[in-house]
Amino acid sequence: MSELYPRDLRGYAEQRPTWRWPKDAQVAVSVVINWEEGAEHNILHGDGSSENAGCDVADGRPRLGSRDLRTESMYNFGTRVGVWRVLDILDEYRVPASVFACGMAVERYPELAAEFAGRGHELCGHGYRWIDYHDVAEDTERDHIARTVAAITAATGDRPRGWYTGRTSPRTRRLVVEEGGFVYDSDAYDDELPYVDPTFGRAHLVVPYAFDTNDMRFATTPGWTRGRDLADELIDTLDELVAGHSDSPRMMSVGLHLRLVGRPARSRALRRFLDYATSHPQVWFGTRIDIARWWTTQESWISESDTATAESGTGPVR
């Protein structure tokens, strides 16, 4: 990466770390719940059209100027039914999750945010709205970050330490770093380990995410049609991470959406994966903040002052 070409096409290359995760594990598995219900496009939210994607609608189309009650109902399923099924499964297997929570969704259902936190899951900022921020004004995006932090803090008593917008603007990471209270963000898909982005004035940690091991493939093309597709993808991914890289740690992200994986057959697939993965001797399950904190104890080029500043939330860092 250089000033003339800002992409990093090299990454760790041949210099990958050789340390292990807690419990001497080779693979850290990060389960992520995306909570977007109540923050998606909707006439009720002041938008010009209602949501028509991201759920089990094969022929979705924009509803200009009116509500799309069918799509709304599918989103509603996520927080009415799906979340409780998923939470009970995670409790059963004693697996912690990181919840990517939209600020508006938390404002509409703060009791659910408290429930996530009470069951030991990490809440991360996921934008204030479940929208594409690419063309959103910088001041609006900055305000949305602040509102999301405030919503999660008010609902749980603890500010989020992680951030994931998903549909970012060119300014998102800079604004996240400037906010000053985040340990990491996950707006990247380019590695199987955390890494440092030094672009914006301090060593900012990136904990990459993934779409291949993500139930959103039930709502995209090319996609999945059977619950077992999800289980097969997750199990095969884990097996290859263990078999193919015995000399280096790896991280695996499992992306879940309440309105998708909360349906019975897909929840069964999640059970199948957790049956396999929780009994695997080379696997450690951690939240993303767990992974970030462990990584910083192993990698000496993260300065203690950078980590302490983000952990304390005393920013902004300019």
Image (tube, rainbow, N blue to C red):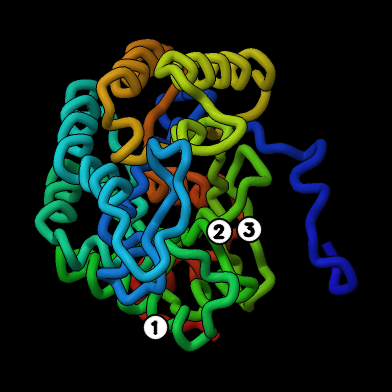
* Disc 2 and disc 3 in contact, CB within 8 angstroms: yes
Q: What mark, if any, has residue 3 been given in the picture?
A: none
For marks 1 and 3, the one nearer the N-term is 1
Write down the residue under mark 3.
196
Which kind of residue does numbered mark 2 sit on? Leu
Q: Secondary structure at mark 2?
A: strand
Q: Nearer the viewer, residue 290 or 155?
A: 155
Q: Nearer the viewer, residue 128 or 249?
A: 128
Q: Nearer the viewer, residue 260 or 140?
A: 260
Q: What mark, if any, has residue 205 been given in the picture?
A: 2
Write down the residue under mark 1.
143
**Image quadrant of residue 104?**
bottom left
Q: Residue at x 38, y 77 (%)?
A: 144
Around disc 2, counting alpha carbons within 10 Å, would you say few (fewer than 14), some (14 to 19), or many (20 or more)? many
Give the x, y percent position of residue 315.
41, 81
Q: Residue at x 50, y 82 (%)?
A: 317
